């Protein structure tokens, strides 16, 4: 198929109706320049072929609310959806769909470019500006100089599904083992030695690191590739499933509210880690990760009966939080790590890490131990008004600080007039990455939905709590190879496509947008409640009391608040209230899974510490695959993986 | 504060309209926090952001008529206005569609080469001088705030504008790039620039990006190659 054919579509013309997306009424549609070459006329030509309409009526909201702690798919009970109406949607067709345009996606695309596979990439944000990868910050790139296969123990340590890594390594002729490809994708890595050669920040047999990485160059490079078409500002809200097989995804083109079906032979999920459940400080949860990653697709997989793993695992760091709006941001804040232990203070100015009862040497090498020391001080009430510990930006710290943080110190001092040598910054432990992804097999494919491949699938990042650039390169590339193999060997063209699965999702979304409830609660209000309820339970120290309180409040939100969720804005074009509503349901579900998956583990594991169960328990050395028990509750499978030696 | 927000849903409204909101302020409150206050407490507003710290440019808006990043712009008591970034089609309220220009910038940044670099070339062809110049341009987050304010862009619409010219400069300084970037700069309007420095003034990443120094260097290199015009601006 050529590029034009690849994205062929049929537009379903619903008769003029006030529920038809605004764009179809007005004909003014902001178009993405990244998808130029896609002829819209072809949609009309093919109009008859894929025609279908969805009828939305009251009660047909695709919403099941069966009590218990179950999070309703929608918010229907008792709500009236305005009269019967037809919904139009556009269908796009591609062989290979990639959801997300961050590090995972670009890594999958690099493999597609190498192997000549055409792909259609979807991103919720403007292309190049989405996800953690789309922020223009100085990334540290890490790799094992001996490749993934031989000496990757640094990365693989916390991985549970080791066979998957062996498969990934063995099938990869270009295992990431240095900076060569990165530079050929447009980077200059301009931290250099006096002779102009690349300066390695870390240079050890098992691991090398280079700074001053700006991955936007990768996005430029692959965004220009002939085999890659991009649809941005498009939020995927569901996977498209026929007979248990994932045959694409569905979502909303945000600028107009147009519904879209993406019909694909294979779909790769790379929609990032969601830290959006972890508290709230005026503009963001306590995270330096991004607001767009709200686990939309992962939670859609859950709603459809798929299993979700690793939501109990997250990765943490320490970052400043005042001034509040800049909390944890990589572009305006600085934080500390275990190199700064002598400078970290409690609210009384005590350098708590230096307590002789603690193991300072261990803090240096064991990030998790260090995080727990800090968390304990905060839990003991020795933190500041926001519950943080204090870090001054004194001259010693400035000397060892990376430039990207030093510029933040300068910004804070310039804008607030503070002298951070004298006035230490209050810092919190922020969650920068998070699991909570579909269970996959050794070939990256969802165990429930053939055709769906997940770059961050459960048991790959596992106790590590989240991804990084190197993992994305290994797993993104492998996901693409597996998906291509699937198209070649296993994919069967459905005899007839049942569009109802997509139409049900459009009904749910329309219901969310249009429903009116007396005493309705705005989604943003509910979202804040979820974030506040989850914060105490999802830190690095998780007490049983905090977990139980979070479970209770999340169940209450699901039962009482979600059915009352209603919007103040019913328009289709970039409706933030609507986006909030869709995201709120996903955040609630992910919060519930995260708390529950911790709660059932009578142990301490990975980044989290349970004071009531201070040791790891080998009976729980497994992935928990959580699914909907069909009765309004959650059930889980304990999934164990063969203990193959790795590195091989 | 009294915050006037320019609102617009292009598929419904005939034209943009203003709405005034009462927003309680606190110390070091940012414009983004003020808009979030309205969204959370008063009325849904369509606005965009991701990084909360000048890394993405997605929050850029006009504040009292000046292009800023809402995320690091502190607000004060009194009456203030916030409107979508000028010069771009409005998607809704404060969200504009910058994608056409962003694609042009991204395409300009793409390195041009005959063949991929080898490890030896990577390590032997870069100099610390070149690396020093490249390093600071990296911090351009492509927000296009500088292009919005640029008088040369207004007087000479075919001028590529500072955000794209920076991309050309980046590849001109990149020893691995093999295209004729000076020609590209000159053809794109290097001599149309009025050397007024407004770009640096509005740029929120100006601790790193010193446009005038970069333009001067490009002009010097262009002059050395004889790529000059009869009436250069801003000399
Ligand atoms: C601030 C920060 C600094 C980090 N620094 C480093 C570092 O220096 N080195 C390192 O190795 N790792 C680092 N990491 C960790 C890791 O590398 C990044 O989080 C990385 O970006 C993860 O890649 P990803 O593809 O999984 O997610 P992302 O890069 O976040 O990409 C996810 C993409 O999916 C899109 N998306 C989300 N939902 C939807 C939807 N419903 N529909 C369509 N698209 C959707 C998003 O818009 C986004 O483009 C850092 C992380 C953060 C947050
Ligand atoms: S130079 Fe500054 S103002 Fe211009 S696009 Fe880059 S970051 Fe924005
Ligand atoms: S110095 Fe040149 S590029 Fe910058 S604003 Fe003035 S005219 Fe525009
Ligand atoms: S939110 Fe990214 S620059 Fe303001």
Image: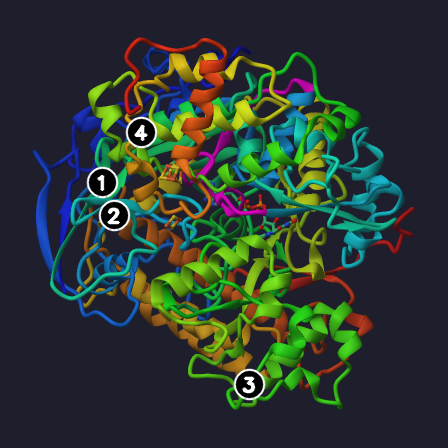
Q: Is mark 4 within 8 Å of ligand 3?
A: yes
Image location (x, y in percent) of residue A539: 57, 73
Question: Residue A530 appears at what percent x and percent y?
Answer: 41, 68
Q: Assess whether mark 1 and mark 2 are in contact (beta carbons under 8 angstroms).
A: yes
**Alpha carbon of mark 3 to alpha carbon of mark 1: how far?**
45 Å
Q: Position of residue A430 (x, y in %)?
A: 54, 67
Horizontal side of residue A44 vs A21, given as left or right? right
Which quadrant of the picture is home to ligand 2?
top left
Lower sequence index among marks 2 and 4:
2
Disc 4 secondary structure class: loop
Q: Nearer the viewer, mark 2 or mark 4?
A: 4
Question: What segment carries the magenta color?
Answer: A115-138
The relative height of residue A408 versus residue A180 in the rendered view (above or below) is below
C-alpha gap between disc 1 and disc 4: 34 Å
Q: Residue beneath label 1, please?
A: B92
> What secondary structure is the magenta-colored segment mainly?
loop
Tell me the chain of label 4: B
- Which residue is tagged 2? B46
Query: Mark 4 — residue?
Result: B195
Q: Answer yes or no: are tags 3 and 1 on the same subunit.
A: no
Q: Is residue A411 magenta?
A: no
Return the disc, 1 or 4, that comes first in the chain's sequence: 1
Which numbered disc, 2 or 1, marks the residue that appears first in the sequence? 2
């Amino acid at each position: 198929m050529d590029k034009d054919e690849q994205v062929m579509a049929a537009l379903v013309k619903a008769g003029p109706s006030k529920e038809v997306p605004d764009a179809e009424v007005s004909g003014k549609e902001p178009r993405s320049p990244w998808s130029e070459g896609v002829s819209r006329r072809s949609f009309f030509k093919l109009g008859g072929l894929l025609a279908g309409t969805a009828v939305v009526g009251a009660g047909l909201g695709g919403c099941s609310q069966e009590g218990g702690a179950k999070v309703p798919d929608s918010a229907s009970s008792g709500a009236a959806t305005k009269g019967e109406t037809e919904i139009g949607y556009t269908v796009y067709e591609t062989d290979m769909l990639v959801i997300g345009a961050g590090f995972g996606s670009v890594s999958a695309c690099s493999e597609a470019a190498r192997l000549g596979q055409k792909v259609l990439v979807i991103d919720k944000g403007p292309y190049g500006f989405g996800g953690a990868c789309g922020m223009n910050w100085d990334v540290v790139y890490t790799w094992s100089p001996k490749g993934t296969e031989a000496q990757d123990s640094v990365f693989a340590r916390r991985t549970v599904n080791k066979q998957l890594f062996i498969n990934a390594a063995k099938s990869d002729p270009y295992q990431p083992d240095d900076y060569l490809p990165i530079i050929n994708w447009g980077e200059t890595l301009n931290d250099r030695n006096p002779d102009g050669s690349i300066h390695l920040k870390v240079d050890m047999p098992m691991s090398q690191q280079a700074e001053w990485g700006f991955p936007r160059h990768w996005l430029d490079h692959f965004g220009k590739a002939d085999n890659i078409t991009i649809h941005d500002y498009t939020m995927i809200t569901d996977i498209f499933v026929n007979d248990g097989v994932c045959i694409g995804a569905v979502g909303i083109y945000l600028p107009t509210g147009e519904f879209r079906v993406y019909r694909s032979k294979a779909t790769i999920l790379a929609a990032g880690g969601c830290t959006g459940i972890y508290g709230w400080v005026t503009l963001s949860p306590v995270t330096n990760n991004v607001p767009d990653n709200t686990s939309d697709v992962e939670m859609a997989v859950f709603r459809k009966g798929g299993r979700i793993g690793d939501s109990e695992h997250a990765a943490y760091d320490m970052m400043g939080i005042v001034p509040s709006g800049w909390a944890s941001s990589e572009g305006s804040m600085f934080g500390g790590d275990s190199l700064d232990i002598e400078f970290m203070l409690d609210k009384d100015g005590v350098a708590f890490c230096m307590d002789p009862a603690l193991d300072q040497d261990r803090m240096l090498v064991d990030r998790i131990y260090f995080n727990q020391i800090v968390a304990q001080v905060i839990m003991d009430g020795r933190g500041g008004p926001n519950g943080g510990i204090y870090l001054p930006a004194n001259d010693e710290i400035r000397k060892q600080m990376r430039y990207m943080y030093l510029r933040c110190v300068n910004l804070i001092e310039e804008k607030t007039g503070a002298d951070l040598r004298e006035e230490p910054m209050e810092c919190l432990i922020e969650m920068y990455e998070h699991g909570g992804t579909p269970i996959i097999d050794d070939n990256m494919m969802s165990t429930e939905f053939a055709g769906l491949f997940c770059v961050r699938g459960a048991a790959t990042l596992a106790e590590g709590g989240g991804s990084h650039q190197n993992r994305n390169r290994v797993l993104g590339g492998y996901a693409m190879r597996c998906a291509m193999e699937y198209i070649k060997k296993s994919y069967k063209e459905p005899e007839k496509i049942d569009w109802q699965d997509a139409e049900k999702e459009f009904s749910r979304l329309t219901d969310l947008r249009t429903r009116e409830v007396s005493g309705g609660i705005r989604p943003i209000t509910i979202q804040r409640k979820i974030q506040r309820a989850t914060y105490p339970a999802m830190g690095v120290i998780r007490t049983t009391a905090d977990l139980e309180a979070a479970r209770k409040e999340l169940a209450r939100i699901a039962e009482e608040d979600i059915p009352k969720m209603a919007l103040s804005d019913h328009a289709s074009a970039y409706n933030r209230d609507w986006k909030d509503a869709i995201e709120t349901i996903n955040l609630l579900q992910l919060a519930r899974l995260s708390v529950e998956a911790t709660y059932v583990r009578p142990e301490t594991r990975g980044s989290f510490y349970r004071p009531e169960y201070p040791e790891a328990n080998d009976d729980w050395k497994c992935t928990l695959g959580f699914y909907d028990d069909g009765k309004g509750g959650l059930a889980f499978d304990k999934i164990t993986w063969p203990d193959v030696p790795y590195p091989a | 504060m009294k915050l006037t927000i320019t609102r617009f849903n292009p598929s419904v409204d005939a034209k943009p309209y203003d709405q005034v909101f009462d927003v309680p302020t606190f110390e070091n409150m940012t414009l983004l926090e003020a808009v979030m206050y309205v969204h959370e407490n008063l009325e849904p507003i369509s606005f965009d952001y991701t990084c909360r710290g000048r890394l993405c440019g997605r929050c850029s808006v006009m504040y009292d008529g000046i292009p800023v990043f809402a995320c690091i712009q502190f607000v004060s008591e009194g009456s203030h206005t916030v409107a979508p970034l000028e010069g771009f089609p409005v998607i809704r309220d404060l969200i504009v569609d910058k994608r056409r220009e962003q694609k042009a910038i991204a395409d300009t940044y793409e390195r041009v080469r005959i063949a991929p670099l080898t490890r030896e070339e990577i390590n032997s062809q870069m100099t610390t001088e070149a690396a020093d110049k490249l390093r600071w341009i990296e911090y351009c987050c492509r927000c296009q705030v500088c292009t919005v304010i640029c008088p040369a862009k207004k007087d000479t619409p075919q001028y590529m504008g500072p955000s794209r010219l920076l991309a050309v400069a980046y590849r001109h300084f990149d020893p691995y790039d093999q295209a004729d970037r000076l020609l590209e700069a000159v053809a794109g309007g290097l001599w149309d620039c009025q050397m007024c420095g407004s770009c640096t003034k509005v740029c929120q990443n100006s601790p790193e990006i010193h446009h005038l120094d970069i333009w001067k260097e490009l002009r010097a290199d262009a002059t050395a190659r004889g790529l000059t015009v009869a009436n250069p601006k801003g000399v």
